[in-house]
């Protein structure tokens, strides 16, 4: 039975732009061999249908909303052009695996952390991504079996200066150096609480 393969192929045409380009360029030869000849013809008809472009636009808007909504500080720091570039790279590297906003935002943070480890250099980005990722982990829904771990975020610049600037959409410049940790936990009211510590052993 090839129905599931057909459905997966159609979904991939929406979420994976490189796959659609390969199908357009090389035709049936790049499709799953488990598809029937009728399903192959249907896939090829979908590839050239203008409705596919509209569906892909809706899908991209949905994914973009997840990141814009949950990572406001990262968005403010990167700015529109750089954010668009990083999101484009993220979408090529990481196909969506969840419809949940939080999981998508966490995946993007982890992608940016990989980029930083690979040499991406944008001042304050490492601190801000780590802070927003910790926030998401604290707010993430969990079962009773999941342990809620306190989050420790290392800062090299004064977070009391840096964070409010980004929260107000301002570009940070010359933020004072300060080696410290922000320590985050979930209060009894369900809200994330942060306090600053300069203790290197915290």
Image: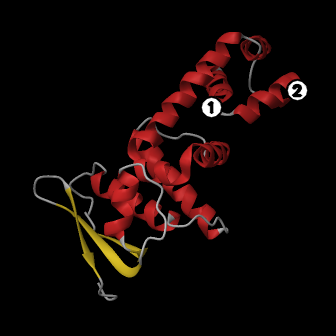
User: Which type of secondary structure does the marked residue at label 1 adopt?
Assistant: helix
In this rendering, does residue 1 appear at all?
no
In the image, residue 96 sits, relative to residue 6, either above or below, namely below
**Which of these two is toward me, 159 or 67?**
159
Looking at the picture, how far across and down is residue 130, in whole percent?
43, 64
Looking at the picture, how far across and down is residue 171, in whole percent?
48, 56
How many numbered badges does the structure rendering display? 2
Where, quadrant-wise, is the N terminus in this rendering? Answer: top right
Residue at 75% of width from left, 17% of height from top?
Answer: 47
In the image, residue 136 sits, relative to residue 174, either above or below, namely above
Residue at 60% of width from left, 66% of height from top?
Answer: 116
Bin the neighbour count of mark 1 within 10 Å (Cα to Cα): few under 14, some 14-19, many 20 and up.
Answer: some
User: Which type of secondary structure does the marked residue at label 2 adopt?
Assistant: helix
Using the rendered view, name the quadrant where residue 5 is placed: top right
Q: Mark 1 highlights which residue?
A: 15
Using the rendered view, name the quadrant where residue 181 is placed: bottom left
Q: Mark 2 highlights which residue?
A: 25
Does 177 sit left or right of 59 as displayed? left
**Which of these two is toward me, 160 or 202?**
160
In the image, residue 30 sits, relative to residue 140, either above or below, namely above
Does 143 sit left or right of 162 as displayed? left
C-alpha separation, residue under disc 1 versus residue under disc 2: 18 Å
Does 189 sit left or right of 157 as displayed? left
**Which of these two is toward me, 129 or 100?**
129
Looking at the picture, how far across and down is residue 120, in whole percent?
64, 64
């Amino acid at each position: 039975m090839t129905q599931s393969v057909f459905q997966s192929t159609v979904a991939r045409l929406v979420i994976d732009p490189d796959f659609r380009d390969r199908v357009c360029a090389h035709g049936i030869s790049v499709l799953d061999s488990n598809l029937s000849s009728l399903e192959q013809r249907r896939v090829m008809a979908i590839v050239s249908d203008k409705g596919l472009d509209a569906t892909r636009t809706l899908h991209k808007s949905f994914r973009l909303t997840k990141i814009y909504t949950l990572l406001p500080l990262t968005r403010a720091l990167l700015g529109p052009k750089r954010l668009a570039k990083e999101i484009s790279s993220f979408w090529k590297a990481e196909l969506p695996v969840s419809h949940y906003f939080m999981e998508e935002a966490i995946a993007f943070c982890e992608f940016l952390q990989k980029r930083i480890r690979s040499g991406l250099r944008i001042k304050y980005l490492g601190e801000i991504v780590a802070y927003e990722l910790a926030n998401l982990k604290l707010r993430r829904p969990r079962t009773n079996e999941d342990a809620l771990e306190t989050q420790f975020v290392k800062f090299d610049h004064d977070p009391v200066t840096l964070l409010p600037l980004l929260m107000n959409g301002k570009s940070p410049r010359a933020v004072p150096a300060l080696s410290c940790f922000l320590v985050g936990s979930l209060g009894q009211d369900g809200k994330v609480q942060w306090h600053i510590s300069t203790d290197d052993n915290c």
